[in-house]
Amino acid sequence: MICPYFSIFVSYLLGWMIPLSGVVLLQATTAEANDLFIRDQTPTNVCPPPVLSRLKRHRIGAGESLESIARQYNLIPATLLGMNPILRQNQMAVGQEIVIPPYNGIVVEIPAGSTLQEIALAYNAQADVIFEINGCQRQPQLVFIPGVNWTPGGPVVPAKAVLSGYPLPAKASVQMGYGWQLHPTVGRVVFHSGVDLIAKIGTPVLSVGEGVVAFVGARRGYGNLVVVNHQSGKQTRYAHLSEITVTVGQNVPSGEILGKVGISGQPDSDEPHLHFEIRYNSELGWVAENPDPYFTVNREQAIGNR
Ligand SMILES: [Zn+2]
């Protein structure tokens, strides 16, 4: 069964996206499915399937390197690093599945209210090209921009001191990490905009840094959500809460209790967890980033538990 929490479902026959909220589910297509799509398309539907519905999976084998895998698919290593945050951690994990785009580029999340033209301008790309290769969707939430090289993000470094806390009282196992993941129950490649930390219902949820509460309340998918804005253009989100104990506009120190772990909204799994996100303010809006570099305790364990 497909968990409705995923924000975007990509139909592999029609190739369009339906925006819902923070997470994305992609149908990994097969060559046969693509052939079927091409045969079925009518003159009014001439767009190719979106690039993000054509991701291949690759299971890392013994002896493989980032460079050798990139070479195998005629890509540059930066493309694989951009698509697969797991590859940025340390050494290659044999057996880990990664996703492979059909050509070089990066994936960009488009915040609500931003246009393709703005995205194109920000990345020095052509809006009509982005439109076409992403399946001619009117309002995509996530697009592939060809030819843009991924680079390690600058915003992570200065903000580490700003967000030095941990969102739970004790280190938790990671149920689903950030980025492209093979979803354990639906068996598809998904984009997860945060990290799911396993915790019992009722566990206090803590602000990871000093900040101002920007939003409290129910949001589709997220359920009961607390959003905190921090210095350095950072934002953190805490979702699926059972209880919220702060109010909008409230100043919170690092470690302040924001609420309690719950199962509200549409969690990715039945096991209670905190869905935690870190976002940075860009000219495109609040863009999700990988929380892993901010977690300093037992990071290896968290990665191993994915
Ligand atoms: Zn989640």
Image (spheres, rainbow, N blue to C red):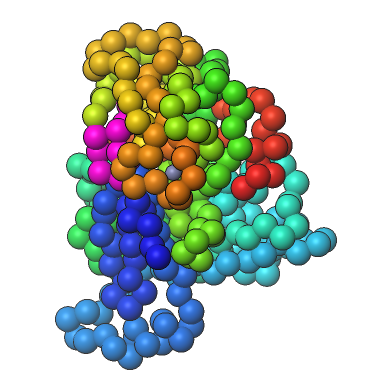
Residue 228 on image: x %, y %: 35, 22
What number of labels is visible?
A: 0
Q: Residue drawn 24% across and 29% down?
A: 217
Residue farthest to the left, as pictured: 44
Q: Is residue 51 above or below residue 280?
A: below
* Whether residue 121 can be seen here: no
Q: Is residue 194 above or below residue 105?
A: above
In the figure, residue 42 lies in which quadrant?
A: bottom left
Q: Is residue 27 above or below residue 226?
A: below
Residue 295 on image: x %, y %: 60, 28
Residue 221 lies within the magenta run = yes
Residue farthest to the bottom, as pictured: 39
Residue farthest to the front, as pictured: 201
Q: Residue drawn 33% across and 71% down?
A: 11
Q: Quadrant of the N terminus?
A: bottom left
* Whether residue 200 can be seen here: yes
Along the viewing direction, whichever of 138 and 171 lies nearer the viewer: 171
In the image, taking residue 111 as reference, residue 73 lies left or right, namely: right
In the image, taking residue 114 as reference, residue 98 lies left or right, namely: right
Along the viewing direction, whichever of 112 and 305 lies nearer the viewer: 305
Residue 240 lies within the magenta run = no
Q: Residue drawn 49% across and 45% down?
A: 271
Q: Quadrant of ligand 1?
A: top left
Q: Is residue 106 above or below residue 186?
A: above
Q: Residue drawn 25% across and 59% down?
A: 18
Residue 2 on image: x %, y %: 38, 62
Residue farthest to the right, as pictured: 63
Residues rendered magenta in the picture = 218-227
Along the viewing direction, whichever of 106 and 254 lies nearer the viewer: 254
Q: Main secondary structure of the magenta part?
A: strand
Residue 5 on image: x %, y %: 35, 51
